[in-house]
Amino acid sequence: MNTAVDRDLVALVSGGNRGIGLAVCEGFARRGVQVYMGCRDLAEGKAAVERRRLTGVIPIQLDVCSESSMLAAIDTIATVHGHLDLLVNNAGMSVGVRDKPSEEHMAQARATFEVNFFGPWRLSQYALPLMRARAQAHIINVSSGHGSSTKIEGNNLAYRSSKSALNVLTQAMAIELADSGIRVNCMTPGWVRTKLGGVAAPRSPEEGAETILWLALDGGGETGKFYKDRTLFPW
C-alpha cells in the first residue's frame, strides 16, 4: 500500500520524456510530487506532458553531457523551490550491443561512459547542496543487470562497465552520505520495452519504474544497495 508523501517533495528525473523516465514522472506526479522532467529536447518533453495530460510535471532542459545544462536545471529548481528531494539518474545509452571487447571503438566507449557514468556523477554533485537537510532526500541511479559483475558476459563492454561503475558510485556516495540522511541506491528495471530495450522486451515502462517509486516514496530498501523488483540484486 502506498504511504503518504510530503506534498512539498520536489523531484528531478533525467531522461524523463519517454520510457522508464516518463513512467517515473507519472508515478511521482500521481503521488503529489512536483516533478521536473529532464529532457535533452524540450519540445519532446512538452509533447509528452501534453500527450499524457500530466499535471505537476514541468519539462526542463537537461543534457547530462553538458555541465551548463545541468547547472541551469539545478539553478532553476533552487530559485523556485530552494530544495530538491529526489534525483533519479535515468538517462542512459547503449550502442554496440554485439561488439566484442577486442573490437569496440574507444570513441563509442567514451561516449557511453559520459552518459551512463560521468553524467549521473556530476548531476548528483550539483544536486547535493539542494538535498541536504531534506528528510526524504534520495538519489536513485538506474543501472542494469548487465552491470552486475557476477552476471558478466563478453559483448557490449562499454555499456556493462559503465553500469558497473555507476554501481560503485552508488556504494561510494551512500557511504559518504550515510550520516547526512541522504539515501543513495541503484536499481535494475529488467528488460523493458523502451527505445533502448526494444519492442520484444517483456516488461512495460511502468513495471520498470515500480522499484524506483518504491525506493523513493514508500521508504523501501536500505541505502547503498542494488535492487530489482523490490529485492536485493547481486553486485
Image: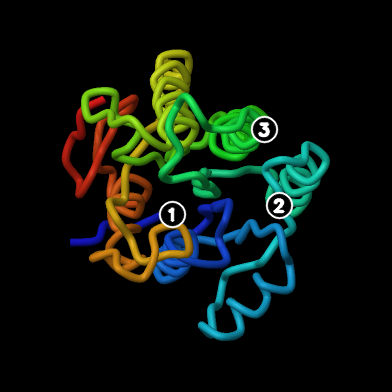
Name the residue located 28 percent from the left edge and 43 percent from the top edge.
219
Determine whether the residue tagged by mark 1 lies in a helix, strand or loop: loop
Determine whether the residue tagged by mark 3 lies in a helix, strand or loop: helix
The kind of residue tagged 1 is: Asp
Write down the residue under mark 2. 62
Quarter in which the C terminus is drawn: top left
Tag 2 near tag 1, CB within 8 Å = no
Residue 128, visible in the rendered structure = no
Instruction: Give the mark nearer the N terminus: 2 vs 3.
Output: 2
Apparent side of residue 231 relative to residue 155 in the rendered image (left or right): left
Quarter in which the N terminus is drawn: bottom left
Quadrant of the rendered structure where residue 31 is? bottom left
Instruction: Give the mark nearer the N terminus: 2 vs 1.
Output: 1
Q: Measure how far apart labels 2 and 1 are at the Cα level.
A: 25 Å
What's the image's color scheme? Answer: rainbow
Apparent side of residue 148 relative to residue 158 in the rendered image (left or right): left
Q: Measure how far apart labels 3 and 1 are at the Cα level.
A: 44 Å
Q: Measure how far apart labels 2 and 3 are at the Cα level.
A: 22 Å
Quadrant of the rendered structure where residue 167 is? top left
Classed neighbour count for the residue bearing mark 1: other residues with Cα under 10 Å, few (<14), some (14–19), many (≥20): few
In this view of the protein, which residue sits in the foreground, 31 or 206?
A: 206
In this view of the protein, which residue sits in the foreground, 104 or 110?
A: 104
Name the residue located 65 percent from the left edge and 67 percent from the top edge.
58
The label number, if any, that marks residue 6 in the structure image: 1
Determine whether the residue tagged by mark 2 lies in a helix, strand or loop: loop
Write down the residue under mark 3. 107
